[in-house]
Image (cartoon, rainbow, N blue to C red):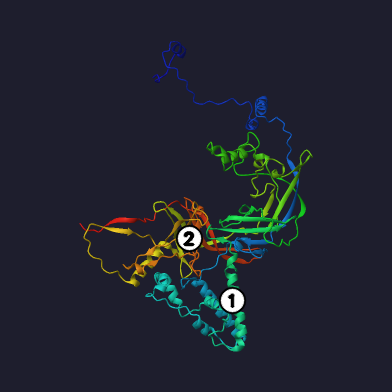
Amino acid sequence: MPVYGTVKNIEAALLGRAEPAITHWNRLEGRPRTHHFDRALRAEIRDPLWMLTKQWQLGEFRGDDAGSPVQARICTSATHFDQYQAEKGAVEKLTLDMPLETKVERRPITWTVKGQKLSLDLRLALGKRWLKLLKQDFDAGDLAGDYGAAYRTQYRIAAPNPTLKADAAICAHADIWQQVSAVAGRAMDGYALLEYLEDAGHNAWDGIGANPADEAKLATLAGGLKDWLGTLVAQPGDPNADAWLPQRLEYQFNLSAPAATGEYVTSAEEYYQGHLDWYSLERSSVAALGPAPSGGPPPELKASSFVPVSLVFSGMPNTRWWEFEERRTNFGEVKPDKTDLGKLLLLEFGLVYANDWFVFPYTLPIGSAATVHGVAITNVFGERIWVEPVSSRGAPAWDRWSMYRLTGPDDERALILPQATDHVQEGAPLEEVAMVRDEMANLVYGIEKRVPMASGASKPGGEAGRELFNLLAKIIGPPPAQPAPVAPVRYQVMNTVPEHWIPFLPVHQPSSVLETRLQRAAMPRLLGNDPAKFDIVEPRTSLLREGLDATPRQSYFVNEEEVPRAGALVTLSYQRTRWLDGRVYVWLGVTKTTGKGEASSGLAFDQLVPTGTA
């Protein structure tokens, strides 16, 4: 029986086009000329001339007389920073005894606000340390009596009273009230002792009933307790030597080192990042920091030899043709705009001149500034080339741009390595303030996102404000009953804002009628119906309380340019690092970052508010 689709006479069927022509193979394979596949796996090029012409077309045979460097010798003169000056302080001697971040950033601990004691954790630590010192000396026979109980009574922690407005900042928060009540009358307030000794004529044994023979020993122990606090948390010794500028929300300081003529002075005009590096400094035009020149040795010329190596970075194209690239960065996927000049220059550097750059490793001593006079390079052809910085070529000022150079004089070509630490551990925010613009109210607000508590911890500002407001309302009592409304609406002069929103008003600069700055203002706490008894809502963070705890009170101003449209987020937190000698340094430091845009407080004036009547 014939199979379906079988054509008996295929030649006649093709000529007469009787059947459709369908070509079908069951298997197609080449005929091998040998039993070995070694040569086939080599992937040899059948046309070497084609490869040569492609190399010629791509310019691989074009000579540029460029030899790779094989040896380099750099000539520098290094000097050490030996003087430090905070923006508001005098010139100090700078040594390597502590990190520069600690010296610049350290802020004082807030112990008391409006008579309310804060930092309970540190107060208890100081009290425990003092009682331990007394116990050790008594057991060793250095003290005639055991005065632990007397000091607990003299410098006791008072129990908070929820019916007093003075203790409302403690009793308004249940967890804080519980912690303070747990140690009240049982533990010693160590800082109260140090605070008492700050006044002239006060002694450590006052009110203790100590043996006169123990007075000298107690005075020595009190000095040791104060020194121990300095090792526990670093604080500025002189308030006038503080580098923090509240009106600019940043740090400012100067460094100087001896130079061949005069001093090498650098300044940090806007430091708020939390990590000091060479780019935090700028070359200053000041000849010297103080009237007395630096007493350090002048810089000496030094020559060092090393072998340069090629610069390698992620996404770097391979320098050889016909080689697969396996990198994590794909420059081909970068799509810059026509006006994005910086990105275009980066792409040109990475794709065109990537293999034209070499790295010269050079070791600098910590806390130094090294001036690079030039580099002598020897290439593979034996040629020696003297390379000087771009700024010394005599080109116009606009043609002297250099990437890794301090902003300053045109002849500046120094390598800066400040005595900064490599890594800093940052604790949870103790204070956090968001400076935002409220365009609807035409105000700037300092929103206290986190406020310090009496226990030494922090709490969200909104939650702490509500709890304090509710307790004060209970203490003051309910307002008198209002008369029944007779109209569906009533006139409201103004409403209020949350208690953790601190307003700043625009005011004129003292010497200008056009420039403005921001002055801290206050909102009333509307409790009851008697305006004479209304309280003023004060900030609870030290960042916004600038001048409130001074005698007399002072106004606080912030430069308007420090609060852009995006706002600013200022954070105060504990910082910790380990220094060269292994010592641990802890300090309170401030950092500033960009905010999250504008905000609306809802503040309004002259409104008609519904009364709820028909």
Image quadrant where one finds the C terminus: bottom left
Q: Is residue 10 left or right of residue 135?
A: left
Q: Is residue 270 above or below residue 182?
A: above
- Residue 197 pos. (x, y %): 56, 78
Q: Quadrant of residue 258?
A: bottom right
Q: Quadrant of residue 32?
A: top right
Q: Quadrant of residue 70?
A: top right
For label 1, the residue is 225
Q: Is residue 55 left or right of residue 201?
A: right
The amino acid pointed to by label 2 is Glu
Mark 2 neighbour class, 10 Å CA radius: few under 14, some 14 to 19, many 20 or more: many
- Residue at image position (39%, 70%) is 172
Q: Nearer the viewer, residue 470 or 539?
A: 539
Q: Is residue 5 above or below residue 147?
A: above
The residues bearing labels 1 and 2 have C-alpha atoms spaced at a distance of 31 Å
Residue most toward the left?
A: 614
**Mark nearer the N terminus (1 vs 2):** 1
Element carrying mark 1: helix
For label 2, the residue is 432
